[in-house]
Image (tube, rainbow, N blue to C red):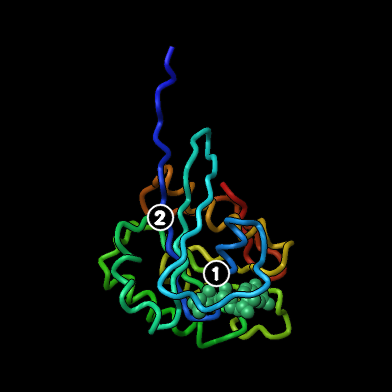
Amino acid sequence: MLTPYVQTRIFKIIVIGDSNVGKTCLTFRFCGGTFPDKTEATIGVDFREKTVEIEGERIKVQVWDTAGQERFRKSMVEHYYRNVHAVVFVYDVTKMTSFTNLKMWIEECNGHAVSPLVPKVLVGNKCDLKDLIQVPSSMALKFADAHNMLLFETSAKDPKESQNVESIFMCLACRLKAPRLGGGRCGGGEESGGRLCWAPC
Ligand SMILES: Nc1nc2c(ncn2[C@@H]2O[C@H](COP(=O)(O)OP(=O)(O)OP(=O)(O)O)[C@@H](O)[C@H]2O)c(=O)[nH]1
């Protein structure tokens, strides 16, 4: 008997935020499980993919690592937002301007007719640099709540945080696989030492 052919679904997730916040490193950590020794500014876009299994279904998570520098993104912006399934907004916890600039990134996203139903999450990266933190968790959480987003504070660099990085994308993939009405919280949230960690669904 022939096994029925089931096409793998592809979820397009774009990663947006200021230059140098760690978008490339986060996508490397999720898709390849490592932290790159050296990165260069992304020009246009880089694609990384990872196939995951959720409740018996194989799903291809296609991560679009976008350029943070205006000069490298200009001609690509339309492509970033076209048919996007989910958006990850990233800031650097050690750089307040990368957090205040989030408003601009959200406006850009809204300006490209991304549906309010498209799930969006907020990621504070570089939490390993504990002595340099400028953006308090409370401030980030307030912002995330105001924009109906989950907040993840993590580090692409610290291997102990790799599970948390995984949770960002797995949480979105779970929500996309079984969309719920409204915001909804994904996975079990747990507050530890002032930081929010989210377990995968
Ligand atoms: N300490 C620390 N450094 C990090 C972390 N993530 C990224 N970096 C460093 O931050 C710098 C920028 O990282 P990228 O991932 O290239 O940043 P980006 O947001 O992709 O930058 P653009 O491509 O210009 O938009 C690099 O020197 C990384 O090594 C982290 O979690 N902790």
Q: Position of residue 64 (x, y in %)?
A: 44, 62
Badge 2: residue crowd in 10 Å (few <14, some 14–19, many ≥20): many
Give coordinates of residue 30: x percent, y percent: 59, 58
Q: Considering depth in this image, is 158 or 8 the residue closer to the camera?
A: 8
Q: Closer to the camera, 200 or 75?
A: 75
Residue at image x 38%, y 84%? 71
Answer with the quarter of the image where residue 198 lies. bottom right
In this rendering, does residue 91 appear at all? Answer: no
Is the CB of mark 1 within 8 Å of ligand 1? yes
Q: Position of residue 3 (x, y in %)?
A: 44, 20
Q: Is residue 88 left or right of residue 94?
A: left
* 175 left or right, relative to 96: left
Q: Amino acid at mark 1?
A: Thr
Specify few, some or many for label 1: CA neighbours under 10 Å numbering under 14, 14-19, or 20 or more. Answer: many
Residue marked by disc 1: 24
Is 7 located above or below residue 31 in the figure? Answer: above
| Residue found 31% across the figure and 61% down from its top | 116
**Can you tell me which quadrant of the image ligand 1 is in?**
bottom right
Residue at which label 2 appears: 12
Could you tell me which residue is drawn at 48 percent across and 53 percent down? 172
Q: CA distance from mark 1 to mark 2?
A: 16 Å
The local secondary structure at tag 1 comes to: helix
- Disc number for residue 179: none
Q: Amino acid at mark 2?
A: Lys
Residues at circles 1 and 2 in contact by the CB criterion of under 8 Å: no
Q: Mark 1 or mark 2, which has the lower sequence index?
A: 2
Farthest residue in the top direction?
A: 1
Residue at 51%, 78% (x, y): give it: 41
Residue 18 visible, this angle: yes
Name the quarter where the N terminus is drawn.
Answer: top left
